[in-house]
Image: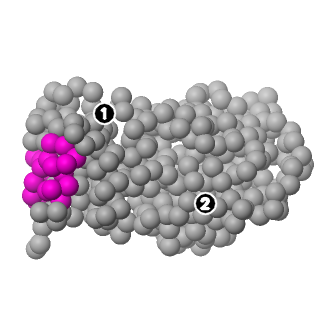
């Protein structure tokens, strides 16, 4: 059986050796070479023709961002970024530039700490190698969104209230490929619509605050990492914190977010299923669930719960999904109302909400 060839690019000798050992723990993988900076990385890619590159972002001579642009545009190579938590904002920039996924490197360089990423790294390598990378076009808001009109203000924070519109909540679940997809969707809204948005994006602890801050800078909605007790309000986007689940309850007529530890049965965290099941019981027919790109079947139980309560379900189509795993499983339930390309998701939300 032909082995998958990988080149490791990292300026730390210790990290290169450790990452190589982890990768070669996969029977089908062979690390064919390594590079200590971007310039050397290009040379190794040309000479060795790998199937995948793992990439550190901070390196001398040519940094990881420059190399990433070259690898994704000239060579169409899948790239997994391996970066420290302190570089969270840089990770999201890398994902926007075309990296398919990332692994969080521990802050300590101790051997036992670095080995903690072994399972995550191996799983993501196997996932990425099963993919055919997709390049998404940037949204053209004039072409993709229906004619805008000024929406009446919603009655704030009340479950089941929405006199002037058909929905009060949009609940989005996603995984691999999700960060740039979410940025594309949120930046496509040309006004702050009177519904709330809640998001569960599979992500490790420590990254979601930087992710929320990044989305907030490019969106008219108010985006934040969810905290226990946050109100679910029109015009606000709450992102489940990495490594935790986000659920909801009604207190004094207002919907409130609750942040909970995940259970052992939760294969994916933050859990899309847990979030959607919680939304369904509160918002009933006044919620739209959206399942975007991602590996696995998280969300398939949740969309059934949404539909049973009269809500609507949108799934990203195979045409644009980086990983057509989660959307495929949602479609397989038979409850999806609409499958649309990524650049049409925002428009579809507006149509389902009755704003056009």
Work out whether 284 lies above or below 348: above
Q: Which residue is mark 2?
A: 139
Magenta includes 27?
Answer: yes
The spot of residue 78 in percent (x, y) is 30, 60
Graded by Cα atoms within 10 Å as few (under 14), some (14 to 19) or many (20 or more), the crowding at tag 2 reads: some
For the N terminus, give its image quadrant: bottom left
Of residues 355 and 65, the one nearer the viewer is 65
Q: Nearer the viewer, mark 1 or mark 2?
A: 2
Residue displayed at 29% across by 58% down: 71
Look at the image and tell me in which quarter the C terminus lies.
Answer: bottom right
Residue at the spot x=32%, y=48% of the render? 66
**What's the coloring here?**
one colour
Q: CA distance from mark 1 to mark 2?
A: 31 Å
- Residue 87, given in percent of the width and then of the height, sits at 36, 33
Magenta-highlighted residues: 19-45
Answer with mark 1 or mark 2, whichever residue precedes in sequence: 1
Does residue 313 appear in this view? no
Secondary structure under badge 1? strand
Q: Secondary structure at mark 2?
A: loop
Read off the residue under disc 1: 84
Q: Nearer the viewer, residue 60 or 28?
A: 60
Q: Residue at x 10, y 46 (%)?
A: 21
Does the magenta-highlighted stretch encompass residue 58?
A: no
């Amino acid at each position: 059986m032909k082995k998958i060839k990988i080149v490791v690019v990292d300026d730390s000798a210790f990290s290169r050796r450790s990452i190589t050992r982890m990768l070669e723990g996969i029977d089908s993988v062979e690390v064919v070479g390594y590079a200590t900076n971007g310039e050397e990385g290009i040379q190794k890619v040309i000479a060795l023709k790998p199937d995948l590159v793992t990439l550190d972002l901070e390196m001398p001579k040519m940094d990881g961002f420059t190399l990433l642009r070259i690898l994704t545009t000239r060579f169409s190579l899948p790239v997994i970024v391996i970066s420290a938590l302190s570089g969270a904002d840089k990770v999201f920039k890398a994902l926007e530039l075309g990296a398919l996924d990332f692994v969080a490197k521990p802050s300590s360089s101790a051997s036992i700490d670095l080995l903690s990423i072994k399972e995550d790294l191996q799983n993501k390598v196997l996932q990425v190698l099963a993919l055919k990378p997709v390049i998404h076009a940037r949204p053209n808001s004039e072409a993709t969104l229906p004619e805008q009109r000024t929406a009446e203000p919603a009655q704030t924070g009340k479950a089941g209230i929405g006199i002037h519109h058909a929905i009060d909540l949009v609940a989005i679940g996603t995984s691999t490929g999700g960060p740039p997809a979410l940025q594309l969707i949120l930046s496509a809204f040309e006004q702050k619509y009177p519904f709330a948005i809640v998001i569960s994006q599979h992500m490790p602890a420590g990254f979601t605050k930087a992710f929320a801050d990044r989305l907030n800078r490019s969106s008219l909605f108010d985006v934040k990492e969810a905290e226990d007790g946050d109100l679910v309000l029109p015009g606000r986007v709450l992102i489940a914190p990495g490594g935790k689940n986000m659920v909801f309850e009604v207190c004094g007529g207002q919907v409130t977010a609750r942040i909970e530890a995940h259970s052992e049965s939760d294969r994916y965290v933050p859990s899309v299923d847990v979030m959607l099941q919680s939304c369904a019981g509160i918002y009933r027919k006044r919620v739209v669930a959206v399942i975007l790109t991602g590996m696995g079947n998280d969300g398939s139980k949740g969309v059934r719960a949404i539909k049973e309560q009269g809500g609507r379900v949108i799934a990203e189509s195979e045409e644009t999904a980086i990983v057509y795993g989660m959307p495929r499983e949602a479609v397989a339930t038979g409850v999806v109302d609409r499958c649309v390309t990524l650049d049409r998701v925002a428009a579809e939300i507006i149509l389902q909400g009755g704003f056009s």
